[in-house]
Image (cartoon, rainbow, N blue to C red):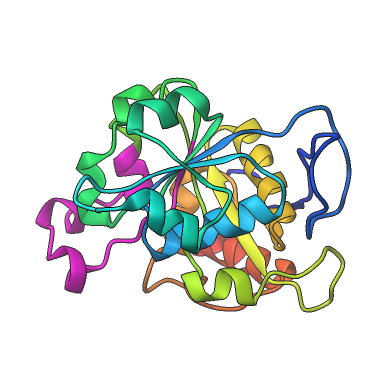
Amino acid sequence: MPPGPRTLHRMTNGPSARPSRGSGTQVEQRPTIGIFGAGKVGTALARLLVEAGYEVRIAGSPRQTALELLVGVVAPGTRVATPDELVAASDVVIVAVPFGKAGTVPWASFDGRIVVDAMNYWPPIDGQLPEVDADPRSTSEQHETRNPEMRLVKSLNHLGYHDMEDDALPAGDPLRRALAVVGDDPDARATLAGIIDAIGFDAVDGGPLANGRVLEPGNPAFGRELSAAELEGMFAAARAAA
């Protein structure tokens, strides 16, 4: 049986980082973060990350015109990059494109990097995808086969983009919302937990990537404002039902 979830608060703040909503613990270096997807989710995350002191790069769709201008307005401080530049410069890559556009992401370039799957399968938007519907694995497990050398985690998908900034609170606030991190690499989960803490949320370690089902649309944790204890309880219930 996989280990149960635990609440994590490991920070990655560098000595020159600006104050964040996190716990404030200092270590030598914090990761550079790249975001694939300059839509509402990607730009909301970029704003939070820049505010927390991270260096952030973002790559949008080739169809997006005047991307530098757009990002300068909606996510100031974020650098626009080509996909190759983004991958080369980033320690952590967040994939925040529509699920149906996942094939446009350069997964083969992600060897060794922590990659955050922030996508959701929405049939009304993405269309009905029989190969996804028929697969018993979580959608993140399906994405993991695109590059087994990446360190894939599932997170940041189970709250709306409008909630990302509205619900962010300082560490220790009794109303602080929890976000889960699942993945097969414990160090990758811990790194992302530090980022989640820095942007204003409690991070719950949900264990292996297969547990990402709990975070998908139509499942218990999706779209709900939960404390760390409540979110941990949902993972425990899912394990008991398995």
* Image point (37%, 46%), residue name: 140
* Image point (83%, 53%), residue name: 19
Left or right: residue 9 compared with residue 43: right
The foreground one among 31 and 56 is 56
Q: Position of residue 242 (x, y in %)?
A: 46, 58
Q: Position of residue 97 (x, y in %)?
A: 32, 53
Which quadrant holds residue 200?
A: bottom right
The foreground one among 36 and 155 is 36
* Image point (65%, 31%), residue name: 187
Which quadrant holds residue 229?
A: bottom right
- Tell me if residue 49 can be seen: yes
* Image point (44%, 55%), residue name: 71
Q: Position of residue 206 (x, y in %)?
A: 60, 52
The magenta segment: 115-143
Left or right: residue 116 compared with residue 164: left
- Tell me if residue 138 can be seen: no
